[in-house]
Image (cartoon, grey):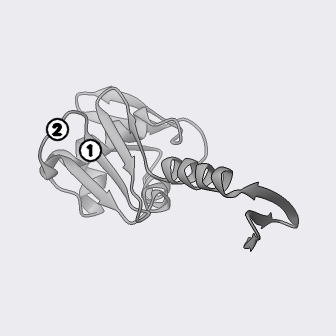
Amino acid sequence: MAVEPDGGDIRVTVDGETIELSREHAAELRDAVGDALTSREEFFRTAAEHREDGSYVVERRGAESTGNSAVFDSFAAVRRLFDRLPETFGAQNLSAAGFTGSRRHMLVRHFAEHPAFPCTLASRNPLRGEKTETS
């Protein structure tokens, strides 16, 4: 990607295609991209935030304390964690990955709630997730 000022306009080249934007439109694009990169999603019991620094935070929905959240370096790190889990998994599998307390259960629920993870809840007591397709 290349960005070049061209008088009053801005030229943006991505994969060999160049478009010319006014400064006003370039600023709108910058704001829209920033909003897309930093977003919050809420599900039934969990929520997730893509932060500006690239990190990804999973938290219990409506929770006020950091004891109800797990911070990952990126969404890709959460994907790698999910990919390492067995086909059917529970809180004990997340203990092996270093998570403690209610965070383990929160992550099982998050995997089942987030559409990017092919997973459903296999049982509620004990809480177990089950992958629904090869990930």
Q: Residues within 10 Å of mark 2 (few under 14, many from 20)?
A: few
104 left or right, relative to 82: left
The residue labelled by disc 2 is: 63
Location of residue 127 (image quadrant): top left
| Closest to the observer, 9 or 105 | 9
User: Which residue is labeled 1 in the image?
Assistant: 59
The answer to whether residue 55 is above or below residue 66 is below
Determine whether the residue tagged by mark 1 lies in a helix, strand or loop. Answer: strand
Report helix, strand or loop for mark 2.
loop
Query: Which is nearer the eye, 31 or 95?
Result: 31
Above or below for 42 versus 103: above
- At label 1, which amino acid type do we have? Glu
Please tell me the numbered disc located at residue 72. Answer: none
* Up-down relation of residue 4 to residue 133 (above or below): below
Q: In the rendered view, does 77 fall on the left or right side of 109?
A: right
Q: Looking at the picture, which amino acid does disc 2 mark?
A: Ala
Residue 45: % across, % down: 28, 30
Q: Do the residues labelled 1 and 2 touch (CB within 8 Å)?
A: yes
Residue at point 38% right, 30% down? 121
| Residue 59: % across, % down | 26, 44
Farthest residue toward the front?
Answer: 8
Q: Is residue 16 left or right of residue 58?
A: right
